[in-house]
């Protein structure tokens, strides 16, 4: 089985079968919304997708929930109530990060 890429190495200079790989695990104490990508928000700008610089790190977002993007038509209507997060209420969540090296 191939070695998974390491978030600490730029693309093209990643680990080989003989180099250590760090694996990060995220365990939510409740369901979480987690996303990961190999670019930062600041890299998006007015670029076309193929022009976004990629591969020098992994950006991970860990959220309790994600607000819906639109209503029934996605452009003018408000988000449906079941997909709306009340920003006036406190929200709390917990998770545990652990790392191993192979």
Image (spheres, helix red, strand yellow):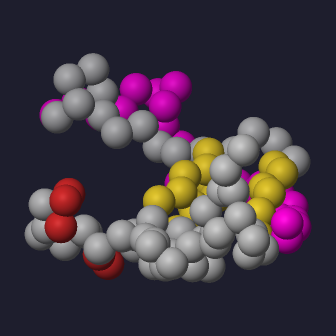
Count of residue discs: 0
Q: Residue furthest front?
A: 18
Q: Is residue 97 left or right of residue 17?
A: right
Residue 101 image position (x, y, % from top left): 85, 70
Looking at the picture, tell me which residue is in the foreground, 19 or 74. 19
Residue 60 image position (x, y, % from top left): 58, 64
Magenta-drawn stretch contains 27:
no
Q: Residue at image x 87%, y 48%? A: 29
Q: Is residue 49 left or right of residue 93?
A: left
Q: Residue at image x 83%, y 51%? A: 27
Magenta-drawn stretch contains 86:
yes
Q: Is residue 80 above or below residue 38?
A: above
Looking at the rendering, the stretch of residues picked out in magenta corresponds to: 76-102
- The quadrant of the rendering that contains the N terminus is top right
Q: Residue furthest top?
A: 72
Quadrant in which residue 80 is drawn: top left
Evaluate whether residue 46 shows in this view: yes
Q: Is residue 19 above or below residue 77?
A: below
Q: Is residue 12 left or right of residue 90?
A: left
Quadrant in which residue 8 is drawn: bottom right
Looking at the picture, tell me which residue is in the foreground, 8 or 44. 8
Looking at the picture, tell me which residue is in the foreground, 8 or 96. 8
Q: What predominant SS class does the magenta segment belong to?
A: loop
- The quadrant of the rendering that contains the C terminus is bottom right
Evaluate whether residue 88 shows in this view: no
Q: Residue at image x 66%, y 56%? A: 4
Q: Is residue 2 above or below residue 69?
A: below
Residue 61 image position (x, y, % from top left): 57, 61
Residue 86 image position (x, y, % from top left): 54, 46
């Amino acid at each position: 089985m191939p070695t998974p890429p390491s978030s600490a190495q730029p693309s093209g200079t990643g680990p080989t079968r003989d180099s250590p790989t760090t694996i990060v695990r995220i365990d939510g104490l409740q369901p979480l919304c987690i996303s990961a990508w190999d670019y930062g928000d600041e890299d998006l700008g007015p670029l076309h997708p193929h022009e976004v610089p990629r591969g020098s790190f992994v950006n991970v977002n860990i959220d309790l929930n994600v607000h819906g993007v639109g209503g029934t038509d996605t452009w003018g209507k408000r988000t449906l109530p079941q997909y709306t997060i009340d920003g006036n209420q406190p929200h709390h969540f917990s998770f545990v990060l652990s790392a191993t090296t192979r």
